[in-house]
Image: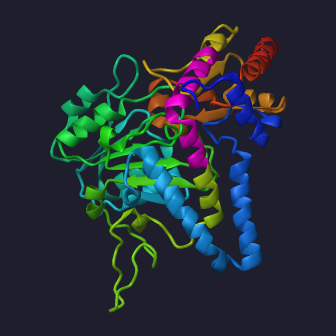
Amino acid sequence: MSALLSTAAVEALRARTPGTQHTTHFNHAGASLPSSATLEAIHAHLWREATMGPMEAGIVGREQTERARGLAARLFNAQPAEIALTTGNSPGWGAAFAALGPWRAGERILVGRHEWGGNLSTMRGLAQRVGVSIDVIPCDADGAADPQALEAMLDERVRLIALTWLPANGGLINPAAAIGQVARRHDIPYFIDAAQAAGQLPIDVAELGCDVLSTAGRKALRGPRGTGLLYVRQAFLSRLTPPYTDTHAAPLNGRGEPVLRDDAGRFESSEASLALHCGLANALEEALDIGIETIRPRIDSVAQQLRVQLAELPGVTVLDLGAERSGLVAFNLAGLDAVSVQRRLAAQGIAIGSNGVSYTPFDMTSRGLQQIARASISYLTTEPEIERLLSQIHTLAVQSH
């Protein structure tokens, strides 16, 4: 496609996305709308399982698994051996974290203020059991994690730096590559949660300097729910021992001893859904065909338009931070909590998200926020959809006063 997504190109993509005919979707950060071709790829494999037998159909399914792995490697500028197909962002991130091995009391984890609550749940569990500390990287004037402040925090006790690249509670984009430069200079393991970034921003794992990067298939990539991708840098793989394996991740040798795979497949299971892998492969190919370099400016332009127009509505406060912003737009409406806003819009056929403190506890607490309403856009989002959303929020603002 061309460098810019034309109106005609967007309409063609929407015509191949059945959900756009049934809902006004502003919850792409929760889960986006899959294309007809992605749905057909899933259905085709389920039909093969029904007619050939699930194990027999697995031969075709495994081909699609490897296709998805290769496409993901292209998306991340990685090698296929560095990609594991997972069941979601949190399972992939958690598996890599658990594989770091034993921790000692007094060791430190440094995280961005915007760290995803699911990752923090895992880290805090470790902290409670072992006595590890979790310290927050200070933010710069724009609200993003500050690489210089991070460097000043480092000592010999720091065992991991973890960053959520695009927070779940708003449009900020953290400086993931600059954080990676600090991590590489000091040889500290660096994990990136890219759940909201994949499919929305260009990702080059070499430029990012990360050891591990995880994401979900269901968000900007428009893949099926229950899929995810985990990148593990090949040179870092030997430092990770998964606490759980099966005969896919660690086949038995002639003496009956498990031998860990020498690629990221050590984080996979033989019980994966091959039908979902078929859908994921199609979604990845579609994203690459459109081009992330084309998707990014489209999303940025539409999101900025929405922010400006939302801020003009009475009673609306736009809550996004950051010098560079994503397609997630956070706001609150005076007189209504975020869940009520979400439910009332849903009654009108408009889907948005609403997040509480548990999604991004450090950031929400620091900013005194209990809830946020979140309208997240895609390259599929159109101006008439924005006008409809704004009109309904204006109506809610009038009704709440």
In the rendered image, which quarter is residue 136 located in?
A: top left
- Compared with 339, 58 (above or below) is below
Q: Position of residue 311 (x, y in %)?
A: 62, 11
Up the image or down, 400 lies above or below 69; here it is: above
Asked if the stretch drawn in magenta spans residue 284, the answer is yes
Q: Where is residue 379 in the image (x, y as percent from the top left)?
A: 63, 30
> Quick check: 117 left or right of 257?
right
Question: Which is nearer the eye, 298 or 2?
Answer: 2
Asked whether 267 falls inside the magenta stretch, the response is no
Highlighted magenta segment, given as a residue range: 283-306
Q: Main secondary structure of the magenta part?
A: helix
Left or right of 105? Residue 268 is right
Q: Which residue is drawn at 17% across and 42% down?
A: 186
Residue that appears at 24% across and 58% down: 104
State which quadrant residue 51 falls in.
Answer: bottom right
Q: Is residue 336 left or right of residue 258?
A: right
Question: At x 69% / y 66%, what residue is drawn?
Answer: 45
Give the quadrant of the C terminus: top right
Res 47 visible:
yes
